[in-house]
């Protein structure tokens, strides 16, 4: 109560301080580095990650690109190669003149070398950089290569993808954040009771979003997915708290003499309700932090922080703004379009058995689709990008002209016997889908003494401890074929050199595939257990957590199962995000209704009457909340060209509607069926009549 009185008393100061915080928040947001390389979030200790470090430390080679040059004569390619080599942070450019002088007629070159770099009208070169895949210096080098080479040059590889992705995100983000705000505002104008109040909500939540984004500077950097989603999700899940305060304030205005006193009690009631409600949402985001793929930690921390800031803003900044703007807010109120839901609620509870049957009938197909969707996700990040992106065009060129869909690098012990290296290369060439294996042995042959090998060749393929080989594959990244190929290559490699490492984008994706299955199980378990415990504490019931979670989990199964039935594939990160975020954000709908049901039963109402009242009074809040989440995410889903962003937002939008419908129609039916069990397993739920009889010894 003291806190509420202090907020009301210091409302002008709170608003001034919050506005002043926008300056450092904007600076912090601008200074926070954005990481566009998802493979950076792989856990340490695996060969693909350690191999990348070795490649950079011992060979001076970090990022890697394959470049297709179309319709250019050899002498001009040589000049282009020299220009590329002169670009800052380009460490090595490997073309066939790196291995043989260009004056040597092509007819005299080894076929395997010539075919690896030429196909008649196109030639291919490999570029190594002395900086990491997503380093700013690497991205600058990619842009410089494209400027130097012009339209005849197509740059592929992870760094090229990161370069294009960054440009696309920076162009899209302001637009879809604005779309989310506009659509959420329109939803609130329709479903709330004021023309001005949605704009006040957006201003309050917007300032908290800015503070959240600004404080990310203390994390050093965040992923582009976190940056893209955090503002939209924070708006979607925290605007509910503002709606609760507004309704509570208007209710108190009719009970107290002045607006200051009404707001004091409104803040007090809001804190007790919103803090409890926000804990489940925070728990959903915190569960993401348990992923070994640390993108979850990145997103989880930022969003948990955002929800916490949303609660703080709801009980400090918003009350201050409402009190200062009270007159125009009251003058611009209008009648809500949502009618009284009492009759509708009675009709639903009257046919409760129908919805219980529907609940049971939906479980098998929903779970089947959910399981299948999880098995059919895709891991090729390039597949999530627009077809007209330079990186995608370059990849297609590489496949069409050279039948190269992915490139790996192998690190083997430099001191391995030459005959073993040749034998290993021969075995690898026989693996299905392997186009070529380029290494010292395959390039110079076994008859050339080590002492006379040109220094430029030696520098490309050897360091003090390791020898480098390059494998070109015709299999696309993230496919089952490439996964089997990598397993076979690794098996051959370890058979000759147990310390050898297979590295590159495709092997990293293979590791990611293995990791995500484990992460999904862990995060799902953590989120369900954490939210179960929270509901247990909030409802003080053994049975209600099972009922509430089962309703929302079925909504999640339906949401994530639909892609299977619609013949759609979704990006690998989407199911794990949706399963936790949808549970944490929408279980509040169920808690809201159940809390009112408990109150009515405790007051002595019969079960049907209690559920009728709980449902009728909860439907407006559930609709406003669900449609707010839908509106904030649906526009982004339609607009974004990045499938990772659009998929997650579409699933969140659809999930909000499905959860809303499940809570309105199915939850009341389950409360009807399990009422007696709930009453006997919930503290304070035994009706007054039963308590009185128990007190007098009649039962």
Image (spheres, grey):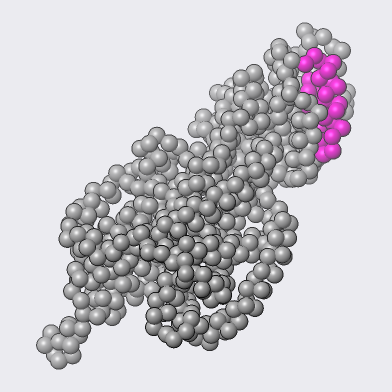
Q: Quadrant of residue 247?
A: bottom left
Q: Which residue lies at the image location 19% right of the left edge and 68% below the top edge?
A: 608
- Which region shows up in magenta? 72-100
Q: Quadrant of residue 67?
A: top right
Residue 158 visible from this viewpoint:
no
Percent x, y of residue 570: 47, 40
In the image, is residue 693 above or below residue 417?
Answer: below
Q: Which residue lies at the image location 38% right of the left edge and 69% below the top edge?
A: 535
Q: Quadrant of residue 181?
A: bottom right
In the image, is residue 184 above or below residue 13?
Answer: above
Q: Along the line of sight, which residue is nearer the eye, 64 or 51? A: 64
Q: Which residue lies at the image location 27% right of the left edge and 63% below the top edge?
A: 341
In the displayed structure image, the side of residue 372 where residue 306 appears, left or right: right
Outermost top residue: 107
Q: Which residue lies at the image location 39% right of the left edge and 83% below the top edge?
A: 255
Percent x, y of residue 365: 29, 44
Q: Does the magenta run of residues contain 519?
A: no
Which quadrant holds the C terminus? bottom left
Outermost front residue: 331
Percent x, y of residue 96: 78, 20
Outermost bottom residue: 696
Percent x, y of residue 230: 57, 56
Residue 502 visible from this viewpoint:
yes
Q: Along the line of sight, which residue is nearer the eye, 272 or 122? A: 272
Q: Does the magenta run of residues contain 81?
A: yes
């Amino acid at each position: 109560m003291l806190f509420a009185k202090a907020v009301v008393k210091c409302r002008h100061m709170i608003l001034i301080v919050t506005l002043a915080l926008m300056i450092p928040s904007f600076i912090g947001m601008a200074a926070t580095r954005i990481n566009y390389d998802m493979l950076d979030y792989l856990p340490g200790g695996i060969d693909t990650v350690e191999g990348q470090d070795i490649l950079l430390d011992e060979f001076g080679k970090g990022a890697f690109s394959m470049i297709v040059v179309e319709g250019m004569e050899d002498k001009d390619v040589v000049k282009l190669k020299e220009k590329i080599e002169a670009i800052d942070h380009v460490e090595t450019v490997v073309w066939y003149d790196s291995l043989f002088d260009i004056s040597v007629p092509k007819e005299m070159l080894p076929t395997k070398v010539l075919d690896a770099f030429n196909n008649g009208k196109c030639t291919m070169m490999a570029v190594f950089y002395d900086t990491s895949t997503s380093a700013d210096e690497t991205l600058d080098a990619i842009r410089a290569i494209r400027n130097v080479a012009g339209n005849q040059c197509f740059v592929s590889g992870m760094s090229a993808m990161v370069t294009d992705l960054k440009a696309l995100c920076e162009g899209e983000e302001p637009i879809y954040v604005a779309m989310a705000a506009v659509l959420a505002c329109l939803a609130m104008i329709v479903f709330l009771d004021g023309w001005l109040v949605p704009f006040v909500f957006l201003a309050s939540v917007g300032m908290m979003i800015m503070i959240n984004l600004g404080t990310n500077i203390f994390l050093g950097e965040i992923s582009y997915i976190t940056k893209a989603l955090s503002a939209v999700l924070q708006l979607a899940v925290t605007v509910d708290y503002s709606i609760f305060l507004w309704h509570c304030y208007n209710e108190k205005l009719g009970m107290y003499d002045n607006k200051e006193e009404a707001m004091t009690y409104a803040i007090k009631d809001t804190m007790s309700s919103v803090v409890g409600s926000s804990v489940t949402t925070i728990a959903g985001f915190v569960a993401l932090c348990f992923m070994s793929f640390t993108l979850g930690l990145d997103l989880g921390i930022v969003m948990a922080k955002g929800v916490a800031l949303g609660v703080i803003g709801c009980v400090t900044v918003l009350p201050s703004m409402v009190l200062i703007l009270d007159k125009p807010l009251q003058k611009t109120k209008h009648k809500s379009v949502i009618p009284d839901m009492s009759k509708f609620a009675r009709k639903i509870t009257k046919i409760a058995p129908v919805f219980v049957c529907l609940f049971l009938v939906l479980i098998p197909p929903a779970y089947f689709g959910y399981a299948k969707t999880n098995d059919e996700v895709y891991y090729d990040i390039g597949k999530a990008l627009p077809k007209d992106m330079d990186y995608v065009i370059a990849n297609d060129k590489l496949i069409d002209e050279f039948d190269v869909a992915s490139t790996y690098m192998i690190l083997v012990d430099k001191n391995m016997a030459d005959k073993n290296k040749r034998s290993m290369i021969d075995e690898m060439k026989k693996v299905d889908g392997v186009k070529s294996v380029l290494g010292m042995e395959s390039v110079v042959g076994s008859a050339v003494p080590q002492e006379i090998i040109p220094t430029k060749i030696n520098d490309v393929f050897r360091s003090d401890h390791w020898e480098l080989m390059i494998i070109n594959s015709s299999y696309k990244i993230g496919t089952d074929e490439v996964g089997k190929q990598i397993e076979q290559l690794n098996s051959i490699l370890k058979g000759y050199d147990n310390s050898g490492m297979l590295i590159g984008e495709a092997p990293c994706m293979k590791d990611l595939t293995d990791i995500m299955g484990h992460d999904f199980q862990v995060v799902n378990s953590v989120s369900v257990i954490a939210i179960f415990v929270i509901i247990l504490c909030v409802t003080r019931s053994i049975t209600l957590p099972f009922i509430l979670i089962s309703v929302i989990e079925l909504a999640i199964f339906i949401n994530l199962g639909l892609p299977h039935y619609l013949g759609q594939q979704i990006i690998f990160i989407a199911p794990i995000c949706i399963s936790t975020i949808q549970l944490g954000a929408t279980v509040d709908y169920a808690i809201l209704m159940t809390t009112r049901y408990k109150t009515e039963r405790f007051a002595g109402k019969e079960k049907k009457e209690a559920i009728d009242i709980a449902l009728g009074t909860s439907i407006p809040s559930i609709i406003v909340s669900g449609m707010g989440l839908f509106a904030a995410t649906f526009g982004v889903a339609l607009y974004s060209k990045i499938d990772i962003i659009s998929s997650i937002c579409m699933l969140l939008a659809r999930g909000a509607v499905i959860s809303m419908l499940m809570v309105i129609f199915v939850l009341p039916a389950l409360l009807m069926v399990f009422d007696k069990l709930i009453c006997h397993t919930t503290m304070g739920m035994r009706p007054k009549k039963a308590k009185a009889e128990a007190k007098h010894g009649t039962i």
